[in-house]
Structure formats: C-alpha cells, structure tokens
Image: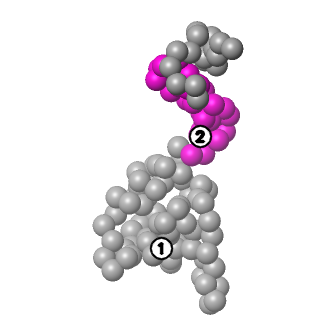
Amino acid sequence: MEKKCPECGEKIIGREDKKFCSDYCRNAHHNKMNKDTKNLIRNINNRLRKNHRILESFPLKDGKTTTTKIKLSDKGFDFDTFTSIYTTKKGTIYYFVYDLGYLPLDNDLYMIVKRE
C-alpha cells in the first residue's frame, strides 16, 4: 500500500513509519496545527509577553525593587493583563505575570518581586 504525505499528497519514500515526504512538509503541517487560530489568544499572549519583558527590565535587588506607575505606563505596561493573583495571609494582593509580580503601594508606587 502506497502512503501519501498528509501535507502535499506526494508519495512517501523511505522508512515504513515515515509520515511526511520531507522536513518542509512536516514543519508546515505542524505549524498549521499548532498556530494560535484566534486573534484573541494571540493578542493576550503578546500582552503577557510584553508585560513580563517590562517587569524583567527592572533590576531586582534581593528579589525585589520599586518603581512608579508612570515608569511602568511609559513602557506600555497593561495593568489589566496578568496570569495570577496571590493574596498573603495579611490580605496583601500581588499580581503576577508568570514568575514576576507587582504590588501596588501608596503614592502610585509599585513593588516588583520575583517568585522563587
């Protein structure tokens, strides 16, 4: 029985368990299957990535630092996009973008922390 490439339909030559005729077809097929099909998901992931890069741009000393809301906003930080919320036993709320978080303080100051 002749096997055909699921991407281009060409005859597959080679090993019995081979699924694609070439690396190009294999990559093209997997890229199609794994791409974000919805703009909403892609846009949210881009905002999360951007927020993480912004938080990462502040040098941390002992795992934390402080900055102002204006500095974050000027870099394009989106305060509505984060991956998780952590509430301490005292009721303090940290907003995390993956492993980096921020805590709103008084006078438009923010403390940036890294989760270990």
Image quarter of residue 37: top right
Q: Residue at x 47, y 73 (%)?
A: 115
Tag 2 secondary structure = helix
Magenta span includes 31 = yes
Residue 95 x %, y %: 57, 68
State which region is magenta: 18-45
Locate residue 107, reporting x and y percent.
48, 74
**Residue that appears at 33% across and 80% down:** 62
**What type is the residue that disc 2 sits on?**
Asn
Q: Is residue 81 magenta?
A: no
Of callouts 2 and 1, which one flags the residue occurring earlier in the amino acid sequence? 2
Q: Is residue 28 visible?
A: no
Give amino acid for label 1.
Arg
Q: Nearer the viewer, residue 97 or 65?
A: 97
Front-most of 66 and 40?
Answer: 40
**Mark 1 — residue?**
115
Residue at x-position 53% and y-position 43%: 46
- Please give the residue where the numbered disc 2 appears in the rendered image: 43
* Left or right for 77, reference 91: left
Name which residue lies at 61% across and 56% down. 80
